[in-house]
Amino acid sequence: MKTYKNPILFTTEYGAIISGIATNSIINSLNSINNQSIRLSIGAFNTSLIPSILCEAKTPPLGFADDTMLVTRAKSTQELEAVTNEALSLVEQRITGLGLQIAVEKTEAVLFTYKYKYTQPAIKLCGGDVELSTEMNYLGMVVDRSMLFKGQVKKAAARAAGIGNQLARIMPNVGGPREDRRRLLSSVVHSVLLYGAPSWAHTLELVPGNVQTLNRAQRKVLLRCICAYRTVSKAATNVIASTPPADLLAVERMAAFDRRRAPAAPTAGDVPRTKTMEAWQERWSTEESGSWTRRLIPDVRPWCARSHGLVTNFHLTQFLSGHGCFGQYLHRFRKSDNPRCVDCRAPTDDAEHAFFECDRWWRRRMELKATINGPFTPETVVGKMMESRSNLAAVERFVKEVLTKREAEERERQYQEQNT
Ligand SMILES: [Zn+2]
């Protein structure tokens, strides 16, 4: 005997969540119900595949799947109660008629209403009462009574963070697995984080908290993927990792889903990824943090569309983020007494100074300019790196050489300080 879990969902004045037309195969499978002079309208949440059965006042339809969802809609509690209980008794007949058993204790019910004050309906199933709750789980999604999906976003973020932490243990910043493996793990985390996005992405405009929760969880994972220090800002992390912010990815998934279901052929300008990149670029150009990264990568579009293997690693990320073995950074995070350059005594030692100005690396910089056959400035370097593999390799070698030397000397200095 199979036990069915039967969540019930009913709405008051929330018709907008239902759309779609029942296919013939569904209608045919429910012929016996049609015989009871009940009108069926089977649909789905506006943007999701979740099947639901809309039960309208006075014309209650019903149906069932492995996990049955019943949606009823009415204008008053009294009407809702009548319609729901009638539909439930039909569900009960139908399921028990097949020799199956309904688990009343596993049945969940949520009331959606815009009303502030209302009387709770008494819902009956198989002679028992079904308690109303504030949220329910359906096909792995948490659907809450406000339909703002805060619970779902939080749950997804927590799961993604859990996976991110597990990754952190197996992927140390220095050394560690190769870029493609990091990418694979990042995609696993994103699929957890964005699960069911077509159903809830529309709430991101209404709930800033959902955006923050998503992007915070994404940042944790991306920091690992690009081997960055935890101090690198969210905006810069996304750019260095060539990954649009999670909230934009969620909206993109929703748009892609709608596009697949649209009857008319979409125009080229409607491509969801193009829109994501435009929105991301707009955000990036007005962002307050990540100014060094923005100087190097002012436009995320060519950066993300680069064709040859520019992969981020521990040293390249320090170069692109400005967070690393630089006097100013060490001073800001209290690892050094002053922001000066220990090599040339310049007052501010930051990424720009270390790679583009410091006298210590003058000769190497000259060699690099000759190799890449052009200027070496913060404004031009990323363009040069994307130009050819040999340019990329030359810049990477230089960055690695400067930082490896700096790190070794910084360790030595700290060792001396501790032992004097
Ligand atoms: Zn210097």
Image (spheres, helix red, strand yellow):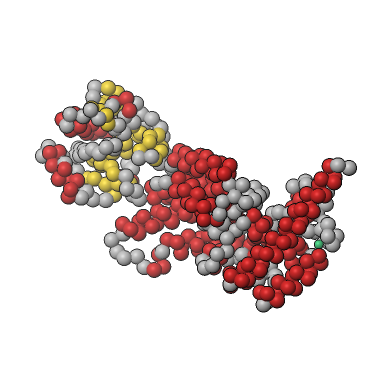
Quadrant position of residue 291: bottom right
Q: Where is residue 269 in the image (x, y as percent from the top left)?
A: 41, 68
Name the quarter showing ligand 1: bottom right
Q: How many marks?
A: 0
Which residue sits at x=49%, y=40%?
159
Q: Camera-side residue: 74 or 130?
A: 130
Q: Can residue 114 be seen in this view?
A: no
- Quarter of the image with the N terminus is top left
Question: x and y percent of residue 110 in the render?
Answer: 35, 33
148 on left or right of 231: left
Residue 165 percent across, percent down from the top left: 56, 41
Q: Residue at x 38, y 39 (%)?
A: 140
134 versus 356 height, above or below: above
Q: Which residue lies furthest to the top in this view?
A: 127
Q: Examine the image and state in which quarter residue 359 appears.
A: bottom right
Give left or right: position of 45 versus 93: right
Of residues 390 and 362, the one nearer the viewer is 390
Tell which residue pokes out farthest to the right in this image: 420
The one nearer the camera, 379 or 362, is 362
Residue furthest left in the image: 35
Residue in the picture at 39% in, 57% down:
255
> Residue 394's x, y, as percent?
66, 68
Write the residue at 81% across / 45% down.
415
Is the residue 316 above or below the residue 222 in the image?
below
Residue 308 in view here: yes
**Quarter of the C terminus within the rendering:** top right
**Is 57 placed left or right of 338 in the picture?**
left
